[in-house]
Amino acid sequence: MFDHFVWSVVAAPVALVVVIALLADRLPPAPAARVLAWSAAGTALASVLNVVAFAVKAAAEIPAVAGYFGWSYQTVIADTGNVRWVPWLCVGLLVWAAVAAGRVVRRHRGGRALAARWAGATARDGVVMVRSPRVEAFAVPGRPGHVVVTTGMRKILTDQQYEALLAHEQAHLTQGHPPLMVLSDLAGALHPALWWVSGRVGYLAERAADEHAAAAVGDRTVVARAIGTAALAAHGRPSPPAGRFASFARPRRPGAIPRRVAALLGHQNAGGRTWPAAIPAVLAASSLIWTGEALYDLVELLVLAHGALH
């Protein structure tokens, strides 16, 4: 089973990060965000399932537990006799992953509470205007979804820039970006190597929305100026707990705003080849398949350990 641990827990997540680092800027942002989010989620799931399998093995190495289920603990130990530390390391990793995932879930529940808060608000053409000096705008998914904009944000933007903002936020709803954020954030919580990928998915989602807004208003410069104006106005001001919803004026990770503006002004558009996106998807699929074999090997080991005492 140790070879499964090496691939799915150690090698595959790191390989995915390397592949994404090489490919992300070469892919159209909209499909790239979807593929990378699902690839990260698949890789994280494979890693966690491997960790769970080894945690079960660690429990089966305890004589009292093995005796209760009728297993030979010596047979279980012998399977990874040269690396006896791995099952017990996985126990710690499993606890750590559970705590980290719980934090992500609690953070995203804040987004659900926000959605419930605005569910009964009066929306005009899908836009909820909130009287507040804060410079904020974000999309709240739901049935129907809403775009929340503060009066402070509306005041600093020209009519054309405001149109770009609305197109940007509507793109988050129509392209299903909030669920992708949840997937990538959970992946980053379950495996530390994938934390960087979650930030990349968030950036690509913003880039995809920027490109949609540029196409909607017909001027990339207007979108770039709207982003820059909002970011400068929001800088240094307190941010509300927007939960899982990305703010138009506030980046999820440092440096995202200048890169988005540069991409718009540099005419880095949404075109390009999409087939390289299959590489991270295949990598994630291979890790899941390998994990399936690890789970099968665990069952075989426990059957063998049961037979050793009977």
Image (cartoon, rainbow, N blue to C red):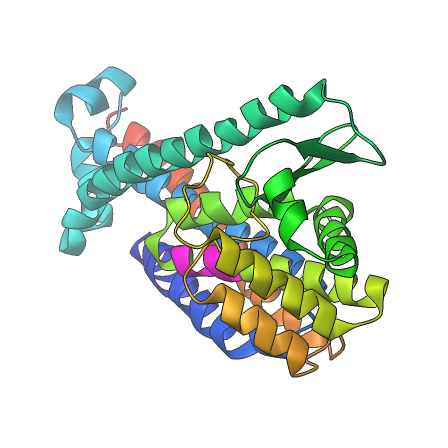
Name above or below for residue 126 compared with residue 209.
Answer: above
Q: Position of residue 33 (x, y in %)?
A: 63, 59
* Left or right position of 60 against 147: left
Query: Toward the viewer: 294 or 153?
Result: 153
Q: Residue at x 15, y 56 (%)?
A: 82
Give the residue at x 61% y 20%.
117
283 versus 170 height, above or below: below
Nearer-the-camera pick, 77 or 196: 196
Q: Which residue is more in the foreground, 229 or 245?
A: 229
Position of the C terminus, as image quadrant, is top left
Q: Is residue 227 left or right of residue 106?
A: right
Return the residue nearer the eye: 296 or 166. 166
Residue 129: % across, % down = 70, 34
Q: Quadrant of residue 100?
A: top left
Q: Which residues are magenta?
A: 195-201
Residue at x 59%, y 72% (from the top left corner): 261
